[in-house]
Image (cartoon, helix red, strand yellow):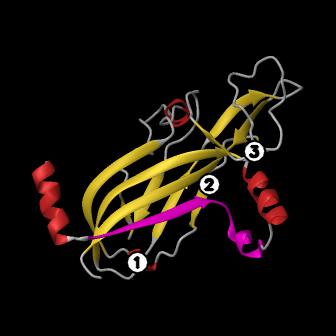
Amino acid sequence: MLEDKMDFRKCYPFSETLMLFSGNERKSEISDMDALFSYLNELCEDTDSPKVQRLLPITSLEMLTNRKEIFLESIEFCGYDFSWQDMPAVEGKIASVESVFGSTITALWQPNFFRPSVRIGGEDVTSNIYNPTPGAEFHDLGIGFPLPFCVPVNKIIKDTKDIDIYASYAQAFKDEVGLWKYRNYALQAIITFWHNRA
């Protein structure tokens, strides 16, 4: 397998790294640190169900989308806590995270709901790890992969005109009146690929 990968490396000698991050189109409005901190804090909102996040590019995708084919090496995911306050300290909270603003998170709790879906050029490159077994959807989608998490892909992808990454990453807790809530956390994806054109 290593020899095969080295053969691919000879065919695709140039490396690229791209980053995507949780967010929305409002990121274009951010022009100072106050706005940036406020925006990042909004990513870690509490909701009635785990929020499915779309990760947006924070580096140009031109090196990916203007190629007929690439060798996709890996996709790495990290999580971040940008919340300004801890979750309510009430009975029934099933796990805790140190809420240091902007700290990385090691997701050792379950359920964490992290089951990413990545499509590049319309192709699912995460081997359907998002899909649950039939009849056990809530259970299966709740038990997510631990973070940081790296998906080794090691395959040729053709017609890489677009990229779509969706994922949830949340922690369940009970609020002051005993209802289940979910603290959502920000996600970063780091994509490494090779190509054969300078």
Type of residue at label 1?
Met
Judge by depth and name the residue closer to the eye, 48 or 83. 83
Few, some or many residues within 10 Å of mark 3 (<14, 14–19, 20+): some
Give left or right: position of 88 versus 125: right
Farthest residue, direction right: 177
Determine the secondary structure under disc 1.
helix
The residue lying at 49 percent from left, 33 percent from top is: 140
Q: Is residue 44 magenta?
A: no
**106 shown above or below 166:** above
Q: Quadrant of the C terminus?
A: bottom left
Spot occupied by residue 123 in the image (x, y as percentages of width and height): 35, 63
Q: Nearer the viewer, residue 187 or 120?
A: 187
Question: What residue type is disc 2 on?
Answer: Gln
Q: Earlier in the sequence, mark 3 or mark 2?
A: 2
SS category of the residue bearing label 3? loop
Q: Is residue 27 magenta?
A: yes
The three-letter amino acid code for the residue at tag 3 is Phe
Q: Residue 63 — which label?
A: 1
**Mark 2 vs mark 1: in front:** 1
Query: Which one is earlier in the sequence, the residue at label 3 or at label 1?
Result: 1
Residue labelled with disc 2: 53
In the visual, does 10 lie left or right of 177? Answer: left
The magenta span reads 14-30
Answer left or right for 178 relative to 10: right
Q: Are marks 3 and 2 in contact (CB under 8 Å)?
A: no
